[in-house]
Image (cartoon, rainbow, N blue to C red):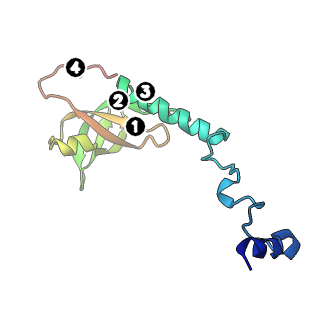
Amino acid sequence: MQTSQLLQQRPTAKAAGFRCFAPNVRPVAQRIARSWLHPTSQASTAYANALVARAVASQAGTPPPRAGKKKVKKMVDITGEVLKDLSNGMFQVKLENGVSVIAHLSGKIRQNRIKVVVGDTVTVELSPYDLTKGRITLRHKPGESAPPATK
């Protein structure tokens, strides 16, 4: 028998009652996939727009726009005098309003190895949540009559 006669005698996939990749069945690779990576999906369009915004911003030298709110510092800057040197970079500071707080050295002061001793005039950052603890952000020069204005 010839091959053309054999192919005519073979039953089709539908007639046999099982699924196979016959010419009338669409392969998986040709099916339309709707995922977030698909070019027409809404998520992929937003992702592509974000990538384009970042690329344009990096070329312009400005930081890319961020989603959500920007962090706002709500710290209170106030000057004071160091009363006591406690252990581990902690100091007891009497503020200009008469309140005594415990303050630690900021990272930049530690990094630049600025020495703070008893009697120094310093600027302390206080959190609005706990007014008994602070961070020493600036050591004023000893010969200055008035500390410089803060931002």
Tell me the distance, in whole angstroms, between the alpha carbons under discs 4 and 2: 13 Å
Which amino acid type corresponds to the residue marked 3 in the rendered image?
A: Val
Callout in the foreground (4, 3): 3
Q: Quadrant of the C terminus?
A: top left
Mark closer to the observer (4, 1): 1
Label 4 crowd (10 A; few <14 / some 14-19 / many >=20): few
Q: Can you tell which mark lies on residue 56?
A: 3
Query: Relative to residue 14, is residue 66 depicted above or below?
Result: above
- The residue tagged 2 is 78
**Mark before the other along the chain sequence, 1 or 2:** 2
Which kind of residue does numbered mark 2 sit on? Ile
Q: Which quadrant does the N terminus fall into?
A: bottom right
Residue 73 visible: no
Residue farthest toward the bottom in the current orientation of the protein = 1
Q: Which amino acid, mark 4?
A: Ala
The amino acid type of the residue labelled 1 equals Leu
Mark 2 burial class by Cα count in 10 Å: few <14, some 14-19, many 20+: some
Which label belongs to residue 126? 1
